[in-house]
Image (spheres, rainbow, N blue to C red):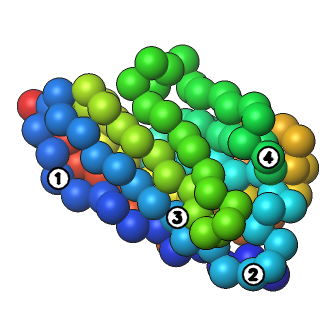
Amino acid sequence: QVQLVGSGGGLVQAGGSLRLSCAASGRTFASYAMAWFRQAPGKEREFVAGISWTGGSTNYADSVKGRFTISRDNAKNTVDLQMNSLKPEDTAVYFCAASGFRRISRPATYDVDYWGQGTQVTVSS
């Protein structure tokens, strides 16, 4: 069992930065691939960024590539998402996710075993 608690969302102007953090409970955190998904109003939940269990492989949605960076610290049971050059279209609820397919860095929603509660990111123009 893994419990995920996301934090760090908020309101920022376009071009600004935010850092999301996800704290995981449980001794098996390092066994999971981790990812961030987001869901805007009226839209489906979509993959944003992912990282394999060792951190050796990362993957990004095309829409955030070059602007967002995912990282993890297995000693601290945390996974972070640094978001730079934010755009209004990045506005969404962001969800931390854990997948038992530990070697992959781009899990689909159906690959996810555990979800965080979501944190709101709002980017104003």
First-in-chain label (2 vs 4): 2
Query: Which callout, 3 or 4, points at the residue further toward the start of the chain?
Result: 3
**Viewer-side residue, 94 vs 40:** 94
Q: Amino acid at mark 4?
A: Thr
Question: Which of label 3 and label 4 is nearer to you?
Answer: 4
Q: Is residue 1 above or below residue 76?
A: below
Kindly identify which residue carries mark 1.
Answer: 11
* Label placed on residue 54: 4
Q: What's the residue type where badge 3 is placed?
A: Cys
Q: Which residue is mark 3?
A: 22
Let me know if residue 45 appears in the view. no
Determine the residue positioned at 49% across, 20% down: 65
Cα separation, mark 2 vs mark 1, equals 31 Å
Residue 20 versus residue 114 in the image, above or below = above
- 34 relative to 94 in the view: left or right: right
Residue type at mark 1: give it.
Answer: Leu
Check if mark 2's residue and mark 1's residue have beta carbons within 8 Å: no
Which secondary structure, mark 1? Answer: strand
Please identify, in this view, whether the residue under mark 1 or under mark 3 is nearer the observer. 3
- 49 in relation to 122, above or below: above
Residue 105 placed where, x, y %? Answer: 76, 37
Q: Quadrant of residue 113?
A: bottom right
